[in-house]
Image (cartoon, grey):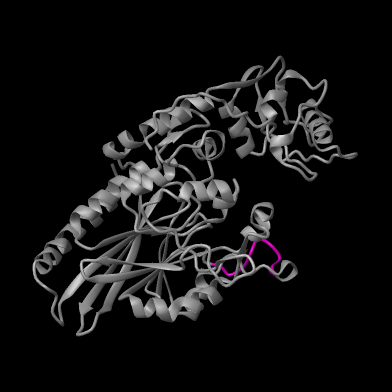
Amino acid sequence: MKALLPTIGVLALAAVVACASNTLSQRSAQPGDHVDLVVMGTTDVHGRLVPWDYYTGQPEERGLAKVATLIDSIRAANERVALVDSGDLLQGNPLDYYFGVVEPTEVHPVVYAMNHLEYDGSTVGNHEFNYGIEALNRALEDAGFPFVAANVFVAGTDTTRWPPYTVVNKDGVLVGILGLTTPGSTIWDRRHVEGELEFRDIVESALRVWPELEAASDVQVVAIHSGMGPGSSYDAVATGVPEENAGQRLAQTIPGIDVIFLGHSHRDVPSEMVNGVLLTQAAKWGEALAVATLTLEKEEHGWRIVDKASTTLSTEGVPSSAAFMAELAPYHESTVAYVADTIGWTAESWSTARARQIDTPAIDLIQRVQLEATGADLSAASAFTTEAQIEKGAITVAERHHRRRRGGLVHIRQHAQGDRDHWRPARGVPRVLGALLPPRRREGRQHRCRG
């Protein structure tokens, strides 16, 4: 109950403010009138739609279903509300993998959920490219809102792959939403994007379209899949790839931006002010909702911002939206069935507990699979964790995904060229091998997912 108190207080205050705004909305705004615009932001959802951990089969205190409750409450209390996302939606858990790779549906569940919540715009994150351009295009084509990215270009051209921005009308207030994403995808998903897309400098790309966006809107917000910065996880000089985290630099360069909704770093950033620009970030996995409130004064031509503030609302203790859960139930049930499938079996337990001190069957298995799967002459495998464990008996899809997430036994990286779909079992490897390979697409499986 304690976790709900800050949220309830914010929503109660919003309701009071909304009363004045609703009175104004009944007539045309006149110079000198004041209204509030609320812009909400999510980021790094990574497939967490419902509050359920598909790895462990247990409920959890996060997910877009909980965020939906906060969104509905804020909309009910305010006349002018916009909703944006800062990317990393389509990869990150078994639901994303199942509907993105194994059994694609007519409408991807994440996009279906976002349509249900009536997003106004979103940018793309680096993980959107993990399953390839074709899978990404298939997912985005059913979005009822625009994906925007001002620094992602069709390779060899000056044409952006997606619109650089969009403008939405919120009861007479024109809100411009500029999209930007980390250039790191050039490195991390080279095999998918090379020759197809170019990821250019965040700030330079924003400057390129800024005069146009500023002229077309009263309020300018940025949905950016990039952290506060400065800095990169890669060597930007050696690779020639622009800076990974550029939120702070963007604010310092373009002080006219009203709010930046950060992403990528998974940080909770309630409120930061840089060069007059408000920055906020909603952590990750549906753990929070970022909320920026802007007080506007009507002028003869357009609006002027007289005050702005932001916060993040935690989803801990917040009930899930019943309507959202009902809409997403078919997708959730299909994912639960998928992760329960048995894909391998072992007569012995496997552990990496002493893999950094002695030779162990677990690492031997990894070495052997890597050699035969890639045709290499030498294999080098590290014990990334000493906590990986496969118990004797059946191995499920959930176990495979869980161990992959933790860097454990059932995630084998290919160290030679080729695609994971072309892997073949190593001759003579124990029966546990089934868990090491990607599940084959199963034909004829029925789903109740809506199209």
Residue 404 screen position, x and y as percent: 63, 36
Looking at the image, residue 328 sits to the left or right of residue 53; the answer is left
Q: Where 271 falls versus 394 (above or below)?
A: below
Residue drawn at (73%, 31%) of the image:
352
Between 92 and 124, the one nearer to me in the picture: 124
Is 380 left or right of 237, judged from the image as shown? right
Q: Residue furthest bottom?
A: 300
Q: Residue 13's spot in the image, x, y percent?
A: 20, 59
Q: Is residue 364 magenta?
A: no
Q: Could you tell me residue 245's position as x and y percent?
A: 57, 66
Count of numbered badges drawn on the protein = 0
Picture quadrant of residue 383: top right
Q: Residue furthest right?
A: 377
Q: Is residue 167 left or right of residue 172?
A: right
Image vertical order of residue 95 relative to residue 219, above or below: above
Residue 316 seen:
no
Magenta residues, dominant SS class: loop
Q: Quadrant of the C terminus?
A: top left
Give the magenta-colored segment's residue range. 229-236
Residue 114: x %, y % from top left: 37, 48
In the rendered image, the vertical position of residue 282 relative to residue 433, given as above or below: below
Q: Nearer the viewer, residue 433 or 284?
A: 433
Q: Residue at x 53, y 45 (%)?
A: 91
| Residue at x 38%, y 59% (from the top left corner) | 121
Q: Quadrant of residue 210?
A: bottom left
Q: Quadrant of the N terminus?
A: top left
- Can residue 280 be seen here? The reply is yes
